[in-house]
Image (cartoon, grey):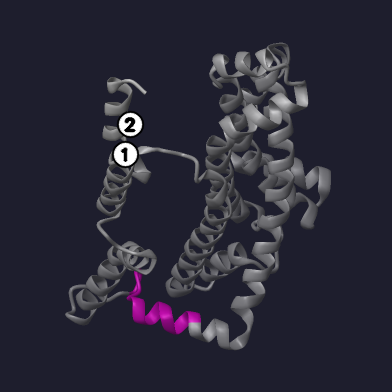
């Protein structure tokens, strides 16, 4: 070994632990040194502060809390609905519809997005139509789906699937078409077959964008379920919203909205948790 090589070897030895130490410092700095529960509590700080502030404002007489009830009244409404079993029935109905629509939308969006991203010919044929349909408001699909599927579960699931489809389709197509060409050329140099190229290069390259597309699609699925449950539903959180409006109970409306928010956050967290082990290889700014 030459003196230069020896010098590099010697100087390189402490670099690895130093880099690891710096990575650890950066990781702690990125999260403020908080653990999982600390971050969860930090995320609850803003809604809790708003809730306490509004409760105090109503208690002080700054508002009568009639149109915007205080948190204590909303919690009482949730307890009443939960005790009667009505809340769980509505949650189960809504979650089953979102799950069915999400599954259909993800399958269709992934398949068509992959075709459009992989083949420029398919993209030129398919994408203009998809971009046009993407601009159609959710409520505009309701009369057509009622004519096609009636007012039963099929029309509701189909509407939710439409909401999920477009973010997933755009995410997959954009991710595949933006993969660095040099990666693909390296795969071809190593004589990877088509399936091997997809499995070893394209899939890892698009996975972060795909997870983001799934989370965006799920968010739209929760939005579309409200419109879906206006189509003759007799149960579901959307029905609970409409019922609260018709009988003049703002606390029930806000309780349903909060339940939507909690369910949306929980399901989004589930997707993020499932995807996290597959994205550990990322060396991004947010992980610093």
Give the extent of the magenta segment: 66-78
Q: Which residue is mark 2?
A: 9
Q: Nearer the viewer, residue 208 or 56?
A: 208
Q: Name the one closer to the observer, 269 or 165.
A: 269
Q: Which residue is mark 1?
A: 13
> Residue 2, position in %: x, y?
32, 20
Crowding around mark 1 (Cα neighbors within 10 Å: few <14, some 14 to 19, many 20+) is few
Is residue 76 one of those drawn in magenta?
A: yes
226 lies left or right of 100: left
Instruction: Point out the residue furthest to the bottom here.
Output: 83
Q: Main secondary structure of the magenta part?
A: helix
Say which mark, if any, is on residue 270. Answer: none
Q: Position of residue 241 (x, y in %)?
A: 54, 65
The answer to whether residue 44 is above or below residue 125 is below
Across and down, in percent, residue 170 comes to 59, 30
Assess disc 2: are there few (<14), some (14-19) or many (≥20) residues with their C-alpha within 10 Å of its C-alpha.
Answer: few
Left or right relative to 246: residue 233: right
Q: Where is residue 137, by image quadrant?
A: top right
Q: Mark 1: which secondary structure?
A: loop
Q: Residue sitting at 59 percent across and 20 percent down?
A: 177
Could you tell me which residue is drawn at 70 percent across and 43 percent down? 105
In the depicted structure, whether residue 237 falls above or below residue 66: above
């Amino acid at each position: 070994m030459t003196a230069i090589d020896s010098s590099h070897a010697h100087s390189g030895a402490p670099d690895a632990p130093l880099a690891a130490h710096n990575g650890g410092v950066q990781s702690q700095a990125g999260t403020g040194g908080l653990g999982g529960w600390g971050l969860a509590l930090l995320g609850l700080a803003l809604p809790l502060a708003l809730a306490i502030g509004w409760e105090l404002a109503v208690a002080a007489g700054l508002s009568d809390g009639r149109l915007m009830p205080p948190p204590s009244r909303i919690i009482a409404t949730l307890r009443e609905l939960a005790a009667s079993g009505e809340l769980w029935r509505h949650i189960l109905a809504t979650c089953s519809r979102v799950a069915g629509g999400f599954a259909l939308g993800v399958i269709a969006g992934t398949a068509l997005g992959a075709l459009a991203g992989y083949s420029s010919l398919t993209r030129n044929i398919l994408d203009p139509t998809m971009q046009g349909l993407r601009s159609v408001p959710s409520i505009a699909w309701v009369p057509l789906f009622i004519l096609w599927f009636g007012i039963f579960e099929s029309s509701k699931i189909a509407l939710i699937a439409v909401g999920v489809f477009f973010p997933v389709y755009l995410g997959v197509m954009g991710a595949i078409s933006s993969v660095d060409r040099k990666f693909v050329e390296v795969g071809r140099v190593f004589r990877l077959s088509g399936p091997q190229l997809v499995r070893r290069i394209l899939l890892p390259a698009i996975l972060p964008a795909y997870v983001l597309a799934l989370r965006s699609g799920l968010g739209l699925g929760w939005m579309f379920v409200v419109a879906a449950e206006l189509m003759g539903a007799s149960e579901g959180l959307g029905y609970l919203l409409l019922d609260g409006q018709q009988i003049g109970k703002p606390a029930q409306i806000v309780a349903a909205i909060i339940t939507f928010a909690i369910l949306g956050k929980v399901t989004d967290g589930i997707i993020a948790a499932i995807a996290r082990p597959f994205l550990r290889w990322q060396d991004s700014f947010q992980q610093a």
